[in-house]
C-alpha cells in the first residue's frame, strides 16, 4: 500500500482534508495516493513534514 494512502487510512483522514491542510489540490493528492503521480520534491518534503516523518519524501518520489 502507498505510504501516504496508509497514513491517511490510519489517521482516518480524507484526501480532501489532507489536501486542504497541506495546501495542495485534492486531485493531486488523490493521484499520489493512487500511485499515478509522484509529488514534486517540494510537496514531498511538505508531506513528510506534515506527517511528522511517517511518510518519507524519498519514498514518495521513488514511487515505491
Image: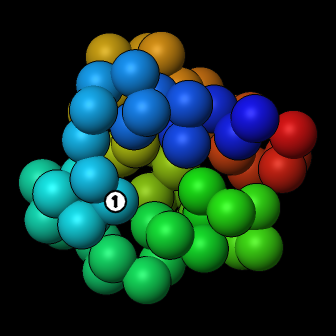
Residue drawn 48% across and 78% down? 28
Query: Which image quarter is the C terminus in?
Result: top right
Left or right: residue 5 compared with residue 61: left
Left or right: residue 12 compared with residue 20: right
Left or right: residue 9 compared with residue 49: right
Query: Which image quarter is the N terminus in?
Result: top right
Residue drawn 63% across and 32% down? 3
Position in image of residue 11 (x %, y %) = 29, 25
| Relative depth, front residue between 36 and 14 | 14
Position in image of residue 30 (x %, y %) = 50, 70
| Relative depth, front residue between 15 and 61 | 15
Residue drawn 35% across and 45% down? 46
Residue 50 sits above or below residue 42 on the image? above
Position in image of residue 34 (x %, y %) = 68, 63
Mark 1 neighbour density, 10 Å: few (under 14) some (14–19) many (20 or more): many
Left or right: residue 38 compared with residue 15: right
Residue behind mark 1: 15
Residue 16 sits above or below residue 56 on the image? below
Amino acid at each position: 500500500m502507498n505510504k501516504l494512502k496508509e497514513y491517511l487510512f490510519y489517521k482516518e483522514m480524507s484526501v480532501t482534508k489532507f489536501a486542504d491542510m497541506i495546501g495542495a489540490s485534492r486531485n493531486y493528492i488523490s493521484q499520489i495516493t493512487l500511485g499515478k503521480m509522484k509529488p514534486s520534491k517540494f510537496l514531498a518534503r511538505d508531506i513528510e513534514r506534515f506527517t511528522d516523518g511517517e511518510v518519507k519524501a524519498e519514498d514518495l518520489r521513488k514511487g515505491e
